[in-house]
Image (cartoon, grey):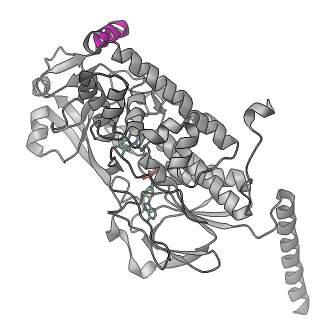
């Protein structure tokens, strides 16, 4: 018996020595931190991935997700194909999405694009032609040089936006969104205190351009008018790029791969509460979700909490990678000495997916009109956009695919309204999203660092909500957590890239 005991002790000592040796090699002289990430969307999964990169294998990471991995990146099967119903298009200059897609061996698909019409409820104020050159001339004819100047302004912004990749590679991290924007370009933080319309007017843009083109892109991308702040307005304008793309098989595949490569433990649980637990620890209390995928397409649903199954775990670091707003938080912060003050609320956006035959006349079109995407310039209409969809899994975008249409609206569409738009419907699916922040013209921006050791990725959404923005927020938070754990503001810093060359 004594021999068995000695053997066990020897085994334990060897284990302790091995892990100590590992920590010494990588420069860590304390036990690995235990980190909780709450949320398995692109923000949470990329946080897990970046933490794994920074800590190498010297961190224990648990990722809590009560719905499906991907969060607001989700696909829906219709007639044997799958369709994006959440975040769907990616800008060619979204460097993290480009890199992850290639690193994980995923393929890019050209974004589904057809002829666009701008509709004001009474007529089409602009319609695409099949020839690109003609389109440019038509746009110039209606909006004059504003079209050219908008492209110039957007290109300039994108160049300055790209500075974040250098800053983050060098290891810079920011406690709040304002300072992150400021370091990219001091103008960016100013833009969050001015409406998009006022900002563009300040540059000499004309009312027609703002009331039509800019309104159409802000309504289509954020369900809001150019009263949104100018930074997010510019993100919406950038989303009108002709080279947009998406991930074959669905954008959510990037989140799935990030989780896999991070080697974080995936806990299918709903976090109900976070409590400080003394000595810089946090207690995270969660419950099993009744059916893991029941919330894939909906906002947080408290009815999923099974009280009997509450479980608490202690962590050194907690990262919240889900929206936290003034009006609606499913996570309670209990016994903190500090009051957390989160901005505003999220916009409800209804995504109605219909496989069926459109009645062209209901959209003031003739059967010969080749319009595939209707954007609206009038916020009072019953929809914000109405467009033909391509599946995520087709090898090319031939129009032999089933006739599937996506309608974005701020309120659910009634049966009789749908019957006006469609002469025949094979299937109708409704996805009710709490989609993105309701933006003000003078926006209160959030904090990434809620407390030392507790971070919030989605603070970045108040500057602009997009997949790439969540990844930038994730990288920032991973760097903050790393510096905090090593108690060294220079941890993770590299020489400025230009000096290295
Ligand atoms: C309809 C729509 C269209 C969009 N179009 C585009 C687009 O074309 N291009 C683009 O770049 N972006 C687009 N976006 C925005 C983009 O999808 C989001 O900005 C991005 O996906 C947010 O990712 P996230 O991980 O930060 O948050 P989420 O994807 O919301 O992830 C948060 C996760 O946390 C989980 N969670 C929440 N609370 C808890 C809890 N208490 N316990 C455990 N888990 C919890 C949720 O289930 C969720 O999965 C669109 C969004 C919507 C809704």
Range shown magenta: 132-140
| Quadrant occupied by the C terminus | top right
Give the number of marks: 0
Kindly tell me whether residue 69 is visible in this rendering. Answer: no
- Whether 320 is among the magenta residues is no
Question: Could you tell me which residue is drawn at 60 percent across and 34 percent down?
Answer: 163
Figure check: 406 above or below 447: above
| Quadrant occupied by the N terminus | bottom right
Q: Nearer the viewer, residue 103 or 195?
A: 195
Residue 222 location, quadrant = top left
- Whether 133 is among the magenta residues is yes
Q: Nearer the viewer, residue 382 or 425?
A: 382
Question: Could you tell me which residue is drawn at 45 percent across and 27 percent down?
Answer: 244
Tell me: 3 left or right of 489. right
Q: Nearer the viewer, residue 206 or 220?
A: 206
Report x, y in % for residue 82.
38, 38
Figure check: 462 above or below 127: below
Kindly tell me whether residue 334 is visible in this rendering. Answer: yes
Report x, y in % for residue 79.
31, 37
Question: Could you tell me which residue is drawn at 52 percent across and 43 percent down?
Answer: 181
């Amino acid at each position: 018996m004594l021999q068995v005991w000695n053997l066990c002790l020897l085994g334990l000592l060897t284990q302790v020595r091995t892990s100590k040796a590992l920590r010494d090699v990588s420069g860590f002289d304390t036990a690995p931190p235990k980190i909780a990430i709450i949320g398995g969307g692109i923000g949470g999964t990329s946080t897990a991935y970046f933490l794994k990169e920074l800590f190498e294998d010297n961190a224990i990471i648990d990722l809590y997700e009560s719905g499906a991995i991907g969060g607001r990146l989700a696909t829906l099967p219709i007639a044997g194909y799958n369709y994006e119903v959440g975040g769907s298009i990616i800008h060619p200059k979204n460097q993290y999405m480009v890199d992850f897609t290639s690193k994980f061996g995923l393929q890019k698909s050209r974004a589904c694009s057809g002829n666009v019409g701008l509709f004001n409820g009474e007529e089409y104020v602009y319609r695409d032609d099949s020839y690109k050159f003609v389109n440019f001339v038509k746009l110039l004819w209606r909006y004059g040089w504003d079209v050219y100047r908008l492209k110039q302004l957007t290109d300039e912004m994108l160049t300055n936006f790209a500075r974040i990749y250098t800053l983050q590679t060098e290891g810079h991290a920011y406690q709040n969104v304002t300072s992150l924007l400021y370091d990219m370009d001091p103008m960016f933080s100013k833009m969050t205190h001015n409406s998009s319309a006022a900002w563009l007017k300040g540059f000499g843009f004309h009312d027609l351009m703002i009331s039509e083109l800019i309104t159409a892109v802000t309504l289509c991308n954020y369900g809001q008018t150019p009263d949104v702040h100018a930074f997010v307005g510019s993100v919406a304008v950038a989303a009108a790029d002709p080279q947009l793309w998406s991930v074959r098989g669905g954008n959510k595949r990037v989140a799935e791969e990030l989780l896999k490569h991070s080697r974080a433990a995936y806990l299918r649980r709903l976090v109900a509460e976070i409590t400080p637990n003394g000595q810089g620890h946090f207690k995270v209390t969660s419950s099993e979700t009744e059916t893991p995928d029941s919330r894939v397409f909906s906002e947080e649903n408290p009815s999923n909490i099974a009280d009997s199954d509450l479980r608490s775990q202690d962590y050194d670091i907690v990262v919240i990678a889900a929206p936290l707003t003034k009006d609606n938080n499913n996570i309670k912060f209990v016994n903190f000495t500090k009051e957390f003050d989160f901005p505003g609320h999220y916009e409800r956006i209804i995504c109605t997916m219909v496989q069926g035959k459109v009645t062209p006349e209901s959209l003031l079109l003739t059967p010969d009109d080749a319009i595939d995407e209707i954007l609206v310039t009038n916020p009072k209409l019953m929809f914000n956009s109405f467009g033909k969809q391509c599946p995520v899994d087709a090898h090319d975008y031939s129009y032999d695919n089933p006739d599937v249409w996506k309608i974005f609206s701020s309120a659910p569409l009634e049966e009789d309204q749908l019957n006006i738009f469609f002469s025949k419907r094979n299937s109708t699916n409704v996805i009710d999203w709490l989609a993105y922040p309701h933006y003000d013209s003078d926006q209160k921006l959030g904090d990434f660092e809620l407390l030392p050791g507790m971070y919030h990725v989605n603070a970045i959404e108040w500057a602009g909500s997009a997949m790439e923005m969540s990844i930038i927020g994730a990288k920032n938070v991973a760097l903050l957590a790393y510096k905090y754990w090593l108690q060294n503001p220079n941890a993770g810093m590299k020489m400025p890239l230009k000096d290295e060359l």
